[in-house]
Amino acid sequence: MAKRSLAALLENKVRPKNSMMELQPILSTLRRHKVILWLLMLEIALICAIVCNGVFLVAQRMQHMNMPSGIAEHELVQIQQAPIAPPPDRYARAREDLATLRQIPGVLAVGMSNQVPFGGSSSNGNVMLSPTQPHQTLSAAEYFGENLVQTLGLHLVAGRALRPDEYVDADVVIKALADGSDKGFPMPMLVSQALATRLWPQQNPLGKLVWLTPKASFRVVGVVATLARANAYRTATAQYSMIIPLHMGADKDQSYLLRTRPQDRQRVLAAAVAALRRIDPARVITHTRTYDQIRSDYFRDDHAMAGILVSVIAAVLLVTGLGIVGLASFWVAQRRKQIGIRRALGATRADILHYFQTENFLIVTFGIVLGMVLAYGLSLWLMAHYELPRLPLSYLPIGAIALWLIGQIAVLGPALRASHVPPVVATRSV
Amino acid sequence: MFAYYLDLALRSLKRNKVLTALMVLAIAVGIGASMTTLTVLHVLSGDPLPGKSGELYYPQIDPQDARGMMPGTLPPEQVTLIDGMNLLRAKRADRQALMEGGAVPIQPDSSAFDPFYVEARYTTADFFAMFDAPFRYGHGWSGADDEAHARDVVITRQLDDKLFNGADSTGRALRIGGSTFRIVGVLDDWRPNPHFYDLGTGSYDYYEQVFMPLQTALELHFDRNGSVDCWGNGTGGQEGSAYPSPTCAWLQFWVELDSPAKAAAYKQFLIHYSEEQKTLGRFVRAPNVQLRDLMQWLDYNDVVPSDVRLQAWLAFGFLLVCLVNTVGLMLAKFMRRSGELSVRRALGASRRALFAQLLTESGVIGIAGGAGGLLLALLGLWLVRRRPSDYAALAHLDPEMLAVTFALALGASLLAGILPAWRACNVSPALQLKSQ
């Protein structure tokens, strides 16, 4: 065994210095340690697959967490309340509450809504482009409530906002539909740009009609740039929203939304709760939150998952790094005598150092090649089981560079130790 | 012999502390990560009613209109009020209960508390017996109470502790949403996880504190929670003023059937009911029924969050990396001892004996790694419990998972030891000894 390796080592020294030439002795040594080589390659390949897909998953989560809501997030607070005993007229109570909230100093606008973007609890309607079509076209969020464009800070890109005189009490509509009547329809509505583009590609959406039930028709009078749904699970459909001019009665599912300057949010919230309690001391305030809290609550699991993924990636890299250190140390210890002979024959410390660095680079490179295939396979498996897009090819070079770096850092210590083996070792027996 | 191998293993492990520590660490972190995620998965996919779940079924029928009808379309996941009441009153199962979630304001007599809202379940008489809900005091209400819209209420031990300091409060009055109810029973601790009977209101760590007859709650227009699925001109209604339309499915209906034969007969009854309703003109579609038992229902609803499954896969991928790493390190370690092993071979030890000795060494690493992994898993679960997810509070290690931890660690390390041990005990002693 020693003969050929020794020959290889000697050969290296006699030949003129050339980096290509240096590969051959390394390769021939690796050929003699196939099992260890394969183990290292397999490990590198597994890490390559896990790290590439892991980083991609983190990026996906980050993208999801940064999904736009289309509203003035830092200027909004939400209050939800519930009466102990129902008031005689829920609509009158809502009007009274809204009028009172508008009086609070620092409040720029007040609105009321049955849902908020990323609020979790959602109301959705099945949208149809004709009252008789056999299948619904899609499902979109139905925002009901007052003064939403101004309060939420929505950006109107076409048409006009809803006028106060266009609003109808929800009970009137519910009753009409229960009786099978289409009295009062079509009602005006606003749609999000994403919904308009999906329903009427390349056409002007203003004046178009949609049906939410065979009787309930709506005419588009305005388009808002962006308005996310309350349950925005899938990026593709997250921005399909409609705003319908319905007055909702005061109840536990409605939110009072107040727009204010960011620095006034806590003060306005406290003042608003006090004002609502003055109107009805017996009511229970169930939720008071800034919109920033709503958003972070909605994405908390994604946030946690991204954290877990990052920790696992870091742990995988650390364990492997330590493993490479261990194996390289063993390898150096096993070849002390050969290193000594090389040094005695005139190899410099740098030669020895480069030998181990090049060897590590080669092994990692083989591992990466195998790892790319594995990474792609893992991506296909993830696509089949989780709603994920395919791993973009740009992740593969990033993974490769990370692994080369880790490999080089891990091997540096043992390689330096190897380069310090004195030539005199060659003359000693073990 | 084993004691001798153990002694040899410990000596060998002591000789190269860094390499030993690396191997133990690799196994420990791999096992720690796997056991953390596996425990969460185990807790979340558990049976909420062991021993009883096989007898509980969730019937589904299809009262929707023709719109959106396609072959293979699944029936709605809930029932309409009309169908629910029809099926309830038909009493074709051993027990049956119709239910809906909600929230009610409790107005305590004492001025010590402000009024507060609690989660409530509006249901029918059989609910408690069907789901084995244990009573601390009193009992549930009867079917006659259901029909009489009785102002009866069952509260949880938690609410009883809060309002009555844990005293037997049966027979006492409780003001709920402006009406006076009579407490007929107090439940002992009862926390089925997942919240199987109504996954729409919450899957994990969701508990109602008040239970009352469904028809009473509907009469009093108490607020409801959960999803509504409407068709035709149906609307979801508005809290307090109108419940969802007749063409909306929004209630849950469960039946208890104690034999597969009864389940088959009940499915026939559902088909028969659908046909009958179609003749009456209420249903449009051909009978489309499902009768899943409790565990099938949880499975169908993918109740375990997909992130939790993904985390488990991720942890096993990580364990695999750690194992490959350990195989490499063990190989290095065993091959380095070729000299020592050759001497033992030359002195007459069989290959089998060497193999056993080396595997003992792997096993010791595995046990140490398992102990480290257990500590890391406990730390991991503590971190999981600190997360805000609704299932977080449930993540605890049970004895079963403790045993799995050590089995997995030992199995993994022995597996990692096989290849290195086999390679090492195949060295040819003569060549090795000569080259020394």
Image: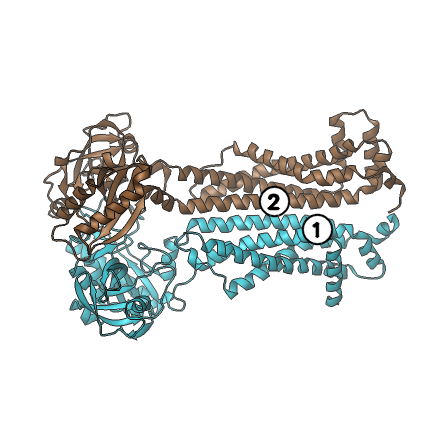
Kind of residue at disc 1? Leu
Residue B95 x %, y %:
28, 69
Which numbered tag is attached to residue B19?
1
* Left or right, residue A301 beside residue B184: right
The numbered mark 1 sits on a residue in which chain? B
* Left or right, residue B345 beside residue A278: right
Quadrant position of residue A33: top right
Task: Tell me the quarter of the image containing the N terminus of chain B.
Answer: bottom right
* Left or right, residue A176 beside residue B263: left
User: In the rendered picture, chain B carries what hue?
Assistant: cyan
Looking at the colours in the rendered structure, which chain would you say is drawn in brown? Answer: A
C-alpha separation, residue under disc 2 versus residue under disc 1: 15 Å
The answer to which of A72 and A211 lies nearer the viewer is A72
- The answer to whether residue B230 is visible is no
Residue A170 x %, y %:
15, 45
The answer to which of B342 and B396 lies nearer the viewer is B396
- The answer to whether residue B44 is visible is yes
Residue visible at 64% across and 56% down? B413
Q: Are marks 2 and 1 on the same chain?
A: no
Which residue is denoted by mark 2 in the rendering? Answer: A318
The answer to which of A150 and B16 lies nearer the viewer is A150
